[in-house]
Each structure stands twice: as structure tokens, then as C-alpha cells.
Image (spheres, coloured by chain):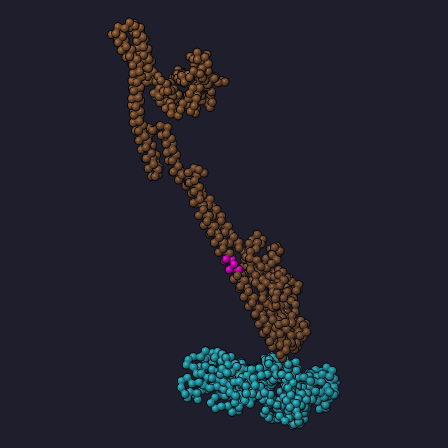
């Protein structure tokens, strides 16, 4: 996640996903609330309508029986019974049909049913029966022998201002009745008696058995469906009252929400996919130039400044490209100037050094020549000795000048290394032979590796580099001490260390150790370590100097075993 | 309390007379007689059966069915030997009427109102002077008038008057035999009793007070009302349909056939019924059920509490008030003898009378 591309993809995905998720969440919540509110309102409206209808039915029922109780024909048939109960029963049956009642019966003042025109139960086995009452008015009664309740109305049969009998009639509330009501209102209905027992319902028996015991609940899971529920009491007659519970399915709301969530998930996935693609595209637009810029910067750091930067990108990055290319061009110019300057400085330094080094031998020569002239003019007796000594000094100094000029000449025309396989053991053996006396005197020792190794190098240059280091180490010894040359191969690199037990180097000396002309010796040319560094660099190796300020110095040369192109 | 003249019994027959009736069938002591004569046999009539001019048996009419069939029971003799019953002649003798000791009369209570008036201050006036009848209150809904002295009039010793709030209850009480006579306000008697052969021969008792009157309300100027002629067809239809013919038309001559009673499509009259009448809206709706074309004459119908024989001069009398008096068949002749009008006059609407 540290890459710009990953972050861009993640960012664009989040930009696509988070608002969508928030919108979909809020939308689903809102729609859910709205749908459930609609379902609740539908349920309340249906139950309100049902309640009103039942109240109206109750009032009508009571009114019908009241009117029938005052009907002269009925009263005459009941009070006179000219043909016995048969005419009365037929009349009551006719009235029951006309008044659209489920049952109608006439009870005399002794409580005996003298005429009964009740419909039979749905299975047509027995007529509807409800407990006879002596109390006029409306009531909810339990059906006898059949599941259900009945709304009964009782009206007195008045004769000469006294109650001569009762008319009892009503409507049966059973499953069929609830089904009719439910079909009209579009809700499932459950009828409970005053003891909260379910006595009829529009649900099937399996669903009825899963109904909760309590009639008060808001939501209900039934038969795999979700329902909203409300109840109202049939406030007829004395309490406790029976009740009707209405259930309305929330399946449409649930389905809508599920569809919405599915759509949201689909849109989310699609949005994330598009965001990833856009992120990849955008990140490529940004990261590829950045990566190219980074690679180009690396090339610059490697000193490859010749190739101009060509990159087509967005305007902001194009500005950076132009600036970077301008910087490359400037650096190239500065490097050329610097090389020229360095070359000039080197030549100046070299000239001063050559002049200085040449001047040193010239002074003894000039002194010897002047001393010889004066001795000759003085005709000194020891002139022959003096001449001999002067000749010896001049010769010696001339030899010094020759050697000096040879070194400068070699430094100036240092050739490119000719790489060839060189066995490490041979290289060390040649050095042992060269310094056989120092080895014998114990000032120099060689530590060979366990196994021999072959490197690709210029054997002569490598030998000269090691000779310079050994020579410096031996010269640093102050009578005592020794120099140790050790070799080892690790990680495809040959490491040769030259350690001495001399006085060591301070920080200032270490800082200028490889500069041409720098020397700690009285008559050194200052080119020895510079030549060593150059040889090592030409072999794609490194040279380092260890050691804290104090006695002892170790130079380490690391050269790749296999040649590098 | 007003004194009322007691009705006198007018014996129908002094001696036995032959009637156009035939013995249809006999069974033991019971004899079934078909009646061809317009003169009806009534329960209690004494019968003498003769064959070839000789009396062979006597009997008494037990029941009469629709003036066409009567059931008699033999009191002496026998018809068993008669081979041809159609040749048996029947002599009928109506025995002198005997006043019963108790006459149970049903009357409307003060709570009962009819289309014309209500009677919250109802007073029961004894048919005889106060000195002859003592009033006893049996209960809130019954009175008892007990005769104190001897009078020529055939009134019973005790009149038991029962008040009914519901005319149906009164009819049922009559049918159950709890009443001997029942008095109803106009229009109250049910179709059932009016059509039942047993009860349909009821009497009307004319009320001495109360007139249904009409008055033209002039729409076009004074003087027109004198020219106004009642729309008898509409008014008689009102009597027929709402009062079941219980009102007594003031105008005797016109419109006795059904065709004459048809209401014209547009009588040109708008009726305004006195709102003080309990049935004003019903009557008004009935009378104005036929749309009238304008300009229409407006006629105001009202109930006037005035002597039926002398209504006010500023109105046109339309109907006087009659009360259906329904009695048990065996008492019908007795009731007639007492006088249906006298019975109807027993109901006096007091000071709280409305309108």
C-alpha cells in the first residue's frame, strides 16, 4: 500500500464505493421505513374500517332486533301462536333471512327457546348455538360446538309495558367470516376470545399453531414471511373483550429492500471495478512518468548525462521533465567545465610538484658545483676528494631526478588494464619473492586463503598496487613491527588486506590520502596511493582504509572475481 | 265529566223468523249451517229446526264464520232422522240482550298519538252520570268503573278500562281474549284485524269533537278562497291510504268509486299541513307527492278541535273523526246496542290536548 498506484486505486475505489454505500444505506432505510409505514397505514385503515363495520353491524343488528321485537305480526305470532310454534318458527326463519342474520331465536319469559331459525354450521351438522341470555343488548358470545364467536343482540318482546320474551339473533364470527372480511381488506385476521385463545383465523392451521400467545406484537415472523400486526378489542358487552388481530405482510417491503440492496451491491461491485480500472489508468498516467523520472535520475546519479530526457506526460509532470532535462544539461556543462578546471588544476599541481621535486636535487648539485669551484679557486689540497665527493653527489641527485621523471612519466601514461586470469597464489608468490628479505627478517608475512582463486585482472597492475601498499607499510614501520598481507574471497569478491603496525593515520590524513601529491614521507612523490586507487577503480573494485586514529593501518582492496563489462 | 246518554238495545227480532239458511252437515250435536240470507246469524241466536211445518229440534248459534257459515249446537231434538237436510227450515230468534257483569275495554293511553292529534291529557269519561259509576284506579294502566246504582241502560256493572301504549298490544290483547272491546284512534287498526273475518265487522264511533279542515291560502289575492273547491280525490286518497278510511268524509256525495279516487297527475294544489299535527310531514308528503305546476294554489290542512257538527265557518270541513271500535263477535250486538259513538266519546282529550 506504499505505492502511489495502490493508493490511487484504493482512493478511487473508496470515492466510488463510500458515497454509493451511504446513499444506498440511507435509501434502503428510507424506503424500508416508507414501505413499512405504508403497510402500517394500510393495516390501520383496514382494521379501522373493520372496526367501523363491526360497530355498524352491531348497531344495525341491535336495531333490527329492536324493530322486530316491536313488529305487530311477530308479536301476534309469539303472543297468540294461533297455529302453535310452527307459524312463529316460519316467520322467524323468514325474518332471519330478510335481516341477513346467521341465527335468530325467540326465548320466552321462562328462558325456553320457542322458535329457532339459526343457520347450520359450515359443515351443516348442527345449527349455530350460543348461550341464551336474559340480558338485552349486544354481546360477544362463544359459539357452542364450533370454533368461533358470535356477535349477539338481544331485544325484549314488549307487551303491555312488560317483557314477554326475548329475541336473540346475531352474526357468527368464524373462519369463513374472517376470510370474507380479510378478502375485502387485504389483511390476515385472527379472532381471539376474551381469554386470548385463537378461535378463528384466516391463516392455515400450520400458521395458526405458530402464532404467539400474546395478542400484542408489532412484528411477526410466520411461515417464512414477515408481518406487521395490530389488534383491537371488540368492545361489545362487559369486559374482558374478545379481540381481532390484523396481520399485513411486509413481503413487498422486504423484497423491495432486498432488490435495492442487491442493486446496491451490483452497483458497488461495478463501481469498484470501474474505480480500479480508472485508478490503474490514472495511476499509470502519474506513476509511469514518475518511475521514468526516477530511472532517469538514477542514470544521472550514475553519471550518464548524455541522453536527453524525452517523456510525454501531463502538463504538471511535463514541467518537471523540462526542469530535470535542463538540470541534466546544466550538469553536463558543469561537469565539462569541472573536468577542464580539474585538469588544469592537476596540471598546475603537477607542474608545481615537478618543479619542487626537480628543485630539491638541484640544490645539492648547485652546492656541490659551487663548493667544487671554490675549492678549485682556492686550490685546496683536498680538491680531488672534494671533486670526487661532488661528482658522487651530482650523480646521486641526477639519479634521483631520473627516477622522479620516470614516476611522473608512468603516471602520465598509465595504460588501461589488460584483463587475464590471474591465480591469487601466483600473485602472492611473486610478492614473496620480491620481498624475500623482509619476509625472512619477519617484517612481512602473507596469509593465504584456504582455497586458491582466480581473478580476471591485469597481473602487473595488481602487483604494482600491492607493492605500493606493502612498500608504504614497510616504510611506516619504525624499526619494529610488521606488515601482514592477507587474502580472502567472499560474495564473489576478492579482498586483499595490507595491515601494518605503524603509527597510523589521523582523520586529516585519511581525508587526503588518495589525492595526488599528498604524502607523509619526506621524499615521497605523493603518487603511490593515487596510482593504487586508479588501478583498483580500473578493475571495478574499491579501496578503503580502516582503523581509528592510533597505531596500525589496514588498506583493503575488493575486486570482483569475475570481470565486469 | 260529561254525562252521556246510554244507548238502548234495539231487539232485532220479537218472534222467530225464517232465514234463508240450510243445514249443510250434522255431526252429533253440532250442526253446520250455510247462510244465504243477508241477515247474518250471530252467536247466541236461538234456532228452531222445522220439517214439514213441525219443529223437530232447537239449537243455539255457537260461532259464525264470515257470514256464510255458522256452527250451532243442538239444545233439544235431533236431525238424525232427516234424510234431506236441505229441506229443513230454520227459524231464528234473537234472545233479549243481557248485559254482562264485566266489560273489558282497551283504550289508547296518553302516550299514543295518531297522525291528527296527541292526547297527553287523556281523561276517561264514564258513559253514565258520575253518580252511577264510581271510578277506581286499578293500576297505572287500568281503571275500573263500578256501577253504583240501577239504571235502565244496559251498561255492565263494571267497566274495566286498560290503557295501551301500543295499538298492536291492544289488538293482541283483544285476540287473546283479554279484552271484550278495543277502541283505536283513526288509522291505528291493523290490516290484519281489518281483514280477519272474526274482527272485520267492527264499528266506528264518531267523535263529537274534532274536524279535519282545509283552507285555501290565497296566492293571487283575496277573494279566491271563496271560489276554492277541495280536491276531494287527493283528500279521500289521504283518508284511504294513511287513515285506512277511518275518517268520516264531510262531503258525502262525491267520489265513492276507486276510479274517482285516483289522484290527478297535477292537481295544481300545494298542501300545507299544520305543523302542530303529529303526522303533518307524513300527510304533507303524501298530499304533495304529485309535482304541481306553478302557480299553484296552496291549501292548508289542519285539525280543528271544534264540535264535529258545527265546524268554524272560515274553514272547509273535510273529515270528522271516527274511532274503530272492535269487539268480540259475541259482543258485537251488545256493543252496537251500547253505541259505538258513546264508547268513542269516553276518550276525552283534556287541557294538554294537542294540537
Horizontally, residue B170 falls left or right of residue A515, namely right
Q: Does residue A451 show up?
A: yes
Q: Which chain is cyan in the rendering?
A: B
Q: Nearer the viewer, residue B104 or A420?
A: A420
Q: Nearer the viewer, residue A246 or B296?
A: A246
Q: Which residues are magenta?
A: A37-43
Residue B56 in percent (x, y) is at 73, 89
Question: Residue A108, located in which quarter of the rendered image?
Answer: bottom right
Residue B302 in percent (x, y) is at 49, 85
Quadrant including the N terminus of chain A: top left
What residue do we see at 74% from left, 87% from top? B77
Horizontally, residue A100 falls left or right of residue B289, namely right
Residue B31 in percent (x, y) is at 70, 84
Residue B122 in percent (x, y) is at 58, 86
Q: Is residue A39 magenta?
A: yes
Question: Residue A85, located in which quarter of the rendered image?
Answer: bottom right
What residue do we see at 45% from left, 15% from top? A443
Question: Residue B324, located in which quarter of the rendered image?
Answer: bottom right
Q: Which chain is brown in the rendering?
A: A
Amino acid at each position: 500500500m506504499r505505492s502511489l498506484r495502490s493508493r490511487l486505486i484504493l482512493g478511487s475505489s473508496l470515492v466510488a464505493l463510500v458515497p454509493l454505500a451511504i446513499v444506498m444505506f440511507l435509501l434502503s432505510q428510507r424506503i424500508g421505513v416508507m414501505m413499512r409505514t405504508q403497510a402500517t397505514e394500510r393495516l390501520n385503515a383496514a382494521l379501522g374500517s373493520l372496526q367501523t363495520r363491526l360497530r355498524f353491524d352491531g348497531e344495525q343488528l341491535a336495531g333490527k332486533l329492536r324493530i322486530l321485537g316491536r313488529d305487530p305480526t311477530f308479536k301476534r305470532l309469539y303472543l297468540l301462536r294461533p297455529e302453535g310454534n310452527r307459524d312463529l318458527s316460519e316467520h322467524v326463519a323468514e325474518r332471519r333471512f330478510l335481516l341477513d342474520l346467521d341465527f335468530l331465536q325467540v326465548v320466552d319469559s321462562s328462558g325456553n327457546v320457542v322458535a329457532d331459525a339459526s343457520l347450520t354450521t359450515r359443515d351443516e351438522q348442527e345449527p349455530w348455538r350460543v348461550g341464551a341470555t336474559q340480558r338485552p343488548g349486544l354481546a360477544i358470545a362463544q359459539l357452542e360446538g364450533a370454533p368461533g364467536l358470535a356477535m349477539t343482540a338481544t331485544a325484549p318482546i314488549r307487551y303491555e309495558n312488560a317483557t314477554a320474551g326475548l329475541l336473540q339473533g346475531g352474526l357468527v364470527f368464524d373462519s369463513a367470516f374472517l376470510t370474507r372480511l380479510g378478502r375485502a381488506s387485504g389483511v390476515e385476521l385472527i379472532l381471539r376470545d376474551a381469554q386470548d385463545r385463537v378461535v378463528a383465523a384466516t391463516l392455515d392451521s400450520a400458521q395458526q399453531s405458530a402464532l404467539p400467545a400474546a395478542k400484542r406484537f408489532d412484528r411477526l415472523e410466520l411461515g417464512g414471511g414477515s408481518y406487521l400486526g395490530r389488534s383491537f378489542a371488540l368492545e361489545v358487552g362487559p369486559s374482558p373483550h374478545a379481540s381481532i388481530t390484523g396481520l399485513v405482510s411486509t413481503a413487498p417491503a422486504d423484497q423491495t429492500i432486498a432488490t435495492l440492496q442487491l442493486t446496491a451491491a451490483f452497483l458497488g461491485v461495478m463501481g469498484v471495478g470501474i474505480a480500479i480500472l480508472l485508478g490503474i489508468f490514472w495511476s499509470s498516467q502519474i506513476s509511469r512518468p514518475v518511475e521514468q523520472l526516477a530511472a532517469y535520475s538514477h542514470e544521472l546519479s550514475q553519471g550518464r548525462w548524455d541522453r536527453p530526457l524525452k517523456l510525454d506526460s501531463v502538463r504538471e509532470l511535463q514541467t518537471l521533465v523540462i526542469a530535470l532535462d535542463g538540470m541534466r544539461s546544466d550538469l553536463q556543462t558543469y561537469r565539462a567545465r569541472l573536468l577542464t578546471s580539474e585538469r588544469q588544476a592537476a596540471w598546475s599541481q603537477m607542474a608545481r610538484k615537478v618543479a619542487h621535486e626537480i628543485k630539491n636535487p638541484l640544490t645539492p648539485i648547485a652546492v656541490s658545483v659551487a663548493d667544487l669551484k671554490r675549492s678549485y679557486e682556492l686550490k685546496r689540497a683536498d680538491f680531488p676528494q672534494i671533486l670526487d665527493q661532488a661528482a658522487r653527489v651530482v650523480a646521486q641527485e641526477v639519479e634521483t631526478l631520473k627516477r622522479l621523471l620516470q614516476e611522473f612519466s608512468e603516471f602520465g601514461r598509465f595504460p588501461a588494464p589488460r584483463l587475464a586470469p590471474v591465480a591469487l597464489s601466483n600473485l602472492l608468490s611473486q610478492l614473496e619473492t620480491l620481498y624475500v628479505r623482509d619476509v625472512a627478517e619477519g617484517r612481512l608475512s602473507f596469509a593465504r586463503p584456504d582455497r586458491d582463486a582466480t581473478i580476471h585482472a591485469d597481473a602487473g597492475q595488481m602487483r604494482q598496487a600491492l607493492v605500493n601498499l606493502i612498500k608504504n607499510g614497510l616504510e611506516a614501520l619504525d624499526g619494529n613491527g610488521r606488515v601482514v598481507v592477507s587474502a580472502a574471497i567472499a560474495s564473489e569478491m576478492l579482498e586483499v588486506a595490507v595491515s601494518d603496525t605503524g603509527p597510523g593515520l589521523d582523520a586529516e590524513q585519511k581525508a587526503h590520502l588518495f589525492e595526488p601529491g599528498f604524502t607523509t614521507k619526506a621524499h615521497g612523490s605523493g603518487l603511490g596511493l593515487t596510482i593504487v586507487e586508479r588501478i583498483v577503480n580500473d578493475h571495478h573494485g574499491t579501496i578503503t582504509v580502516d582503523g581509528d586514529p592510533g597505531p596500525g593501518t589496514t588498506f583493503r582492496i575488493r575486486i570482483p572475481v569475475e570481470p565486469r563489462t | 265529566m260529561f254525562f252521556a246518554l246510554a244507548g238502548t238495545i234495539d231487539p232485532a227480532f220479537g218472534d222467530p223468523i225464517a232465514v234463508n239458511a240450510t243445514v249443510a252437515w250434522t255431526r252429533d250435536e253440532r250442526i253446520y249451517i250455510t247462510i244465504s240470507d243477508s241477515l247474518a246469524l250471530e252467536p247466541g241466536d236461538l234456532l228452531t229446526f222445522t220439517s214439514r211445518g213441525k219443529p223437530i229440534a232447537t239449537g243455539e248459534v255457537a260461532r259464525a264464520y264470515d257470514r256464510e257459515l255458522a256452527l250451532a249446537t243442538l239444545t233439544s231434538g235431533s236431525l238424525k232422522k232427516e234424510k234431506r237436510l236441505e229441506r229443513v227450515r230454520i227459524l231464528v230468534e234473537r234472545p233479549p240482550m243481557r248485559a254482562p257483569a264485566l266489560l273489558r275495554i282497551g283504550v289508547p293511553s296518553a302516550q299514543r298519538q295518531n297522525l291528527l292529534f296527541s292526547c297527553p291529557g287523556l281523561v276517561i269519561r264514564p258513559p253514565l252520570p258520575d253518580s252511577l259509576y264510581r271510578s277506581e284506579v286499578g293500576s297505572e294502566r287500568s281503571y275500573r268503573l263500578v256501577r253504583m246504582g240501577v239504571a235502565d241502560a244496559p251498561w255492565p256493572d263494571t267497566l274495566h278500562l286498560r290503557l295501551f301504549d301500543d295499538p298492536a298490544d291492544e289488538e293482541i290483547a283483544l285476540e287473546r281474549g283479554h279484552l271484550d272491546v278495543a277502541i283505536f284512534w283513526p288509522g291505528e287498526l291493523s290490516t290484519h284485524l281489518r281483514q280477519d273475518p272474526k274482527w272485520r265487522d267492527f264499528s266506528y264511533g264518531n267523535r263529537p269533537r274534532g274536524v279535519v279542515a282545509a283552507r285555501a291560502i290565497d296566492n293571487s289575492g283575496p277573494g279566491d278562497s271563496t271560489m276554492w273547491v277541495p280536491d276531494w280525490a287527493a283528500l279521500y286518497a289521504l283518508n284511504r291510504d294513511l287513515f285506512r278510511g277511518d275518517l268520516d268524509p264531510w262531503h258525502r256525495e262525491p267520489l265513492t268509486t276507486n276510479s274517482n279516487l285516483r289522484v290527478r297527475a297535477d292537481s295544481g294544489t300545494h298542501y300545507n299541513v299544520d305543523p302542530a299535527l303529529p303526522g303533518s310531514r307524513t300527510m304533507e308528503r303524501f298530499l304533495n307527492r304529485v309535482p304541481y305546476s306553478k302557480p299553484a294554489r296552496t291549501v292548508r290542512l289542519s285539525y280543528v278541535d271544534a264540535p264535529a257538527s258545527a265546524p268554524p265557518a272560515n274553514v272547509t270541513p273535510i273529515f270528522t273523526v271516527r274511532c274503530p271500535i272492535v269487539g268480540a263477535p259475541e259482543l258485537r250486538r251488545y256493543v252496537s246496542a251500547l253505541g259505538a259513538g258513546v264508547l268513542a266519546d269516553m276518550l276525552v282529550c283534556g287541557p294538554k290536548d294537542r294540537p
